[in-house]
Amino acid sequence: GFGWGLIGASTIAREYMADAIRRTGGRLLSVMSHDGARAATFARDLDIPGSCSDLDVLLTDPQIAAVYISSTNTQHRRQVLAAAAAGKHVLCDKPLATRSADALRMVRACDKAGVVLAVNHHLRSSPVHQTMQRMIAAGEIGVVRSLMIVHAGYLRPVLQSWRIKDAAEGGIYLDLSVHDIDLASFLLEQTPVAAVALGAGVALGSNTVHDHAMYALKMSGGAFVQVHESFVTPDVESQVVALGSEGALIAAGTLAQRSTGTLTRRVNGHNESIPLRANDLYADTVNQFLGAIAGTGSPRATGRDGLAALAGAEAVAKAAATGKAVAVRHYE
Ligand code: NDP
């Protein structure tokens, strides 16, 4: 089996990614936390042989070929750069960094080191979104000029920590907007070029850490994307709706950690439901990453995809803070 190290004793690693790595044939060899006792507890609970509090200890283990990084967002930059320098392939959770200029450095460092960098934008792995992307690319609903996304829910109490404390690390833009902008870019095969936005901290957040937002993006191919995101609206079923010149595609309940939801095609006033088989979104993401390492494919979301999503989210955050339209920074 392929040897992995976990950087970050996080909720997502515990609940999903440790299992996804094992399901795809990986061997979890070590976990790192800032707190050695925390790492040891995590290792014991998940039956991982090694644990440490020193990143260098994990990165000098020759058995570890790849790392999964799921620490808090401000740590991603330093940890990705260190992993690349140690020659480890990197699957980093989103946001790739907290500033797009940092993400660019990380992408370049991984290129230079010859390691694969993938970002855990797992929504690309949904069979509903995969099917939507293929149908849009094949012109099955004509020219798509609008995409609407409703990604609203209630932030689980266990996650009400750094996500709602500090705008440099948390807030809805770094947490949800990167996912939704990446999904829009994937579905439309266009990148965001400009944003207008409204945002606020209405309940869990504050004036600077927004928990509720609505924004619109203009995409590189001319499509418009409208997004509503919230941490404070329970019981909302997510929606991703692509409006084409010859019909529409409607995904309901797909913006989740598990492979859920339905896909409907609407043509000439008639709704047709498209049957799809569920998968494991995270295991699929890991499998694609392994394929990229083996040289047989590309990650679902590359480092450059993560960079583009972050640049989009940055523009949205700035647009919400200033009330002005903001151009998205473009990186070659
Ligand atoms: P957590 O808050 O659970 O964990 C993040 C870090 O916070 C941990 O690595 C840990 O640091 C520290 N930490 C957590 N709980 C405690 C505690 N009780 N005491 C002390 N330290 C603690 O974060 P998430 O799992 O929610 O998110 C981690 C990353 O994954 C983020 O970048 C997030 O954006 C991303 N994410 C992605 C998802 C996806 O679907 N792609 C879904 C959820 C999150 P240490 O490791 O040093 O101990």
Image (tube, rainbow, N blue to C red):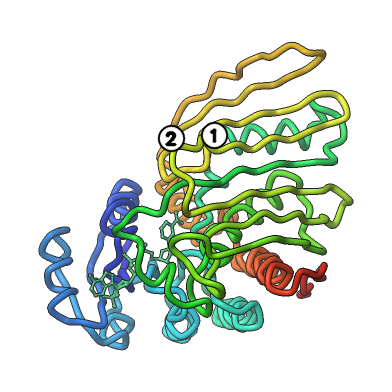
How far apart, in angstroms, are the residues tagged by discs 2 and 1? Answer: 7 Å
With 265 as the anchor, is 202 left or right in this view?
left
Question: Does the residue at mark 2 contact the one at mark 1 (Cβ under 8 Å)?
Answer: yes
CB at disc 2 and ligand 1 closer than 8 Å = no
With 328 as the anchor, is 18 left or right in this view?
left
User: In the rendered image of this protein, does residue 54 appear above or below residue 162?
Assistant: below
Q: In this view of the protein, can residue 10 be seen by the observer?
A: yes
Q: Position of residue 214 (x, y in %)?
A: 67, 54
Q: Position of residue 218 (x, y in %)?
A: 83, 56
Crowd around label 2: few <14 · some 14–19 · many ≥20 (10 Å): some
Q: Residue at x 25, y 77 (%)?
A: 33
Placement of the N terminus among the 4 image quadrants: bottom left
Q: Which residue is mark 2?
A: 279
* Three-letter amino acid code at the position of disc 1: Pro
With 9 as the anchor, is 254 left or right in this view?
right
Q: Residue at x 52, y 60 (%)?
A: 202
Q: Which residue is mark 1?
A: 127
- Element carrying mark 2: loop
Front-most of 212 and 245? 212
In the figure, residue 5 lies in which quadrant? bottom left
In the figure, residue 149 lies in which quadrant? top right
- Element carrying mark 1: helix
Crowd around label 1: few <14 · some 14–19 · many ≥20 (10 Å): many
* Three-letter amino acid code at the position of disc 2: Asn
Q: Position of residue 236 (x, y in %)?
A: 50, 37
User: In the rendered image of this protein, does residue 270 appear above or below residue 190?
Assistant: above
